[in-house]
Image (cartoon, rainbow, N blue to C red):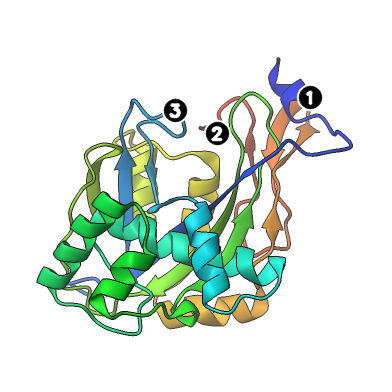
Amino acid sequence: MNLQDEYAEHDQPPPATPAATLVIFRNAPQGGAPQILMVERSAAMTFAGGAAVFPGGRVDEADRDLAQRMGADDDGQRDELAARIAAVRETLEETGLLVGLNQRPSRDEALAAREMLLQRKELAPVLEHMGWAIAPDALLPFARWRPKHRHMRVYDTRFYLADLGTGAVDLLVDATENTHLFWASAAEALDLADSGRIKVIFPTRRNLERLAQFGSFDEAVAHLEKFPSRMITPFMETRGGVPWLAIPDDAGYPVTAEMLESAARG
């Protein structure tokens, strides 16, 4: 399948796996633009192997079950709450960092929770054992990306924002899927990508460019009032005889297109 056929219009989009990812802000220790937590994925991973991404992963059935027990009483509410639960769960598993709770766990509690999560594979028993509760409103919907390419697995990914404030936390890399964790401002992450020191795929680059507009978490929140989360499905268009991969130009993204040939898509 050539690249143009891959993005050709069809009556039905390809099936997509629900997923969630978390953009975690912290105040930069030396001041300046806020830093964002990035996870460098193992090169052996099928999707985005070797790329730097935000923490996250697929939504599991156990996440949906917990969402229903938390009071989500229709499919839309359950899908939304399950995605936030998945973002919390995957972030704990991948980084050892706990966000989106009504409590503020200690380092030792976070370590114990991560160990239990790795054993049980579900967040609900961890929350019950530790006496914690999810705070869904602590995760702010930022965007929802669902590509339509057909040569690889497609994820329907909800992006959320969360704020750590001072960000004095310890991190633990999940060596089975990831190789490196690092904090960087969005602009610094883009510089690392441009210099070849990290790899970023098309959705990550577009979201980093959007995040680089913010000098604080409060600015990001204000931006969401003007550009609330919406579905983003990249599409192909021809410019000067050259195919480009593009996204809508009214969704808050400062850069909305890249030549298809150079766009890293996973």
Q: Nearer the viewer, mark 3 or mark 2?
A: 3
Identify the mark nearer the N-term, 1 or 3: 3
**Front residue of this view, candidates 37 and 196:** 37
Measuring 17% from the left and 69% from the top, which residue is drawn there? 169
The residue positioned farthest toward the right in the image shown: 11
Mark 2 closeness class: few <14, some 14–19, many ≥20 residues within 10 Å: some
Vertical placement of residue 76 versus 186, above or below: below
Q: Which residue is mark 2?
A: 265
**x, y (%) of residue 177?**
31, 38
Crowding around mark 3 (Cα neighbors within 10 Å: few <14, some 14 to 19, many 20+) is few
Under mark 2, the amino acid is Arg
Of residues 24 and 44, the one nearer the viewer is 44
Q: Secondary structure at mark 2?
A: loop
The kind of residue tagged 3 is Thr
Which type of secondary structure does the marked residue at label 1 adopt? loop
Which residue occupies the extreme left position in the image?
Answer: 108
Q: Is residue 237 left or right of residue 202?
A: right
- The alpha-carbon separation of the residues under discs 3 and 2 comes to 12 Å
User: Which mark is first along the chain, 2 or 3?
Assistant: 3
Determine whether the residue tagged by mark 3 lies in a helix, strand or loop: loop
Residue 261 located left or right of residue 198: right
In the image, which disc is placed on residue 46? 3
> At 71% across and 47% down in the image, what residue appears?
233
Determine which residue is flagged by label 1.
241
Would residue 114 be found to the left or right of residue 54 on screen? left
Q: Is residue 49 visible?
A: yes
